[in-house]
Image (tube, coloured by chain):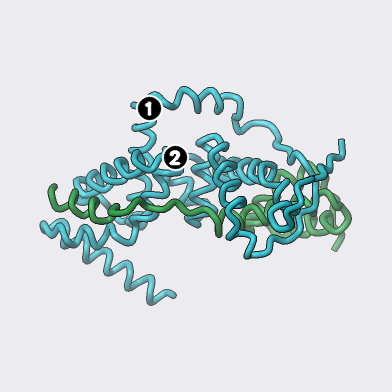
Chain colours: A green, B cyan
Amino acid sequence: MKVIEISCLEVWREISNYLDGEVDAELRARMESHFKVCAHCSAVLDGTRNVVKLVGDGVEYQMPPGFSKRLYDKIKAK
Amino acid sequence: MGALKQSLESNEAELIRRVCAGDKEAFYSLVEPCERAVFTAAMSILNNVADAEEVAQEAVLKAFAALPRFRGESKFSTWLVQITINEARLKLRRDRRHLYDSIDESQTDDQGDCFPKDFADWREIPSETLQRKELKEALKRALDGLPQKYREVLILRDVQHLSIQETAEVLGITEGSVKTRLLRARFRMRDALAPGIDGSWSTGKLEYEKVRPW
């Protein structure tokens, strides 16, 4: 199957969708053959993938102590 | 998976039925598994612990009052997060703190292309790096620096792991906007975190060589 070339700009536009599995098979193949030859785009891909991992693993909003109890009391008082 | 999902759904339906019959304890059983999601959704918009708690409580009480009208078209948790987001936005408007954000947002519409700012190759992040205080702080700073509309999408997708469709539903925007905002949020986070990722957090090396093709 002949893969139609894709520009860096088009790759950037879709890079987040690519990581989320939101691109169709044809676009995926075009992007993957681009990553093989373009160091810049593959660096952007790796960096963006790292961001997704970092945010997923490292971002956590701690609920303040007593949060659940106060919420429960509010419901009870209703 | 199918059986578990089915049993969770029937359990949820049963709890809702009991709440509508006047059982408040059942309502807390319904809310308890969603507490963190509710608090996180409020934080993604308000970025302040006391405000987020206040909004979480208001949202839960609103959900209690509105439960008889809940049709079960989405999951209870999605519905509750949606109410929380609406309450958080209302609070932001009431407090007029949105003035600052709206200036920011007017310069960052979703139109036009979005370029990565730098092409340095990141090495893989060792998992122990994540434990480093500097990285945690840099993550928080980068997140705080995002315009609200990008932060909320990033949190819902990459922290809460809502689907694109659920994210669109709770934020009241199209799936296309979710995807565009997510791309921008991830690129901004990448630009903000790149210097440390390139090595300074894991090696103590502070210099960072930017790679720009233009």
Q: In this view, does B8 lie to the left or right of A73?
A: right
**Marks 1 & 2, CB-CB < 8 Å contact:** no
**Label 2 crowd bin: few (<14), some (14–19), many (20+), radius 10 Å:** some
How much space separates mark 1 and mark 2, taking CA atoms?
14 Å
Which residue type does callout 2 highlight? Asn
Q: Nearer the viewer, residue B213 or B49?
A: B49
Vertical position of residue B153 compared to residue B102: above or below: below
Q: Is mark 1 on a helix, strand or loop?
A: helix
| Label of residue A24 in the image | none
Q: Is residue B59 left or right of residue B158?
A: left
Q: Is mark 2 on a helix, strand or loop?
A: loop
Q: Which of B169 and B24 is in front in this view?
A: B24
Q: Where, quadrant-wise, is the C terminus of chain B in this rendering?
A: top right
Q: Do labels 1 and 2 share a chain?
A: yes
Task: Give the labeled residue for mark 1.
Answer: B93
Q: Nearer the viewer, residue B35 or A17?
A: B35
Kindly tell me whether residue B162 is visible in this rendering: no
| Label of residue B47 in the image | 2
Q: Where, quadrant-wise, is the N terminus of chain B in this rendering?
A: bottom left
* Chain letter of the residue beneath label 1 in the structure image: B
Of tags 1 and 2, which is closer to the observer?
2
* Chain letter of the residue beneath label 2 in the structure image: B
Q: Residue at x 41, y 47 (%)?
A: B41
Kindly tell me whether residue B172 is visible in this rendering: yes
Horizontal and vertical percent position of residue B79: 34, 50
Horizontal and vertical percent position of residue B76: 32, 56
Horizontal and vertical percent position of residue A3: 84, 57
Q: Residue at x 38, y 27 (%)?
A: B93
Which residue type does callout 1 highlight? Arg
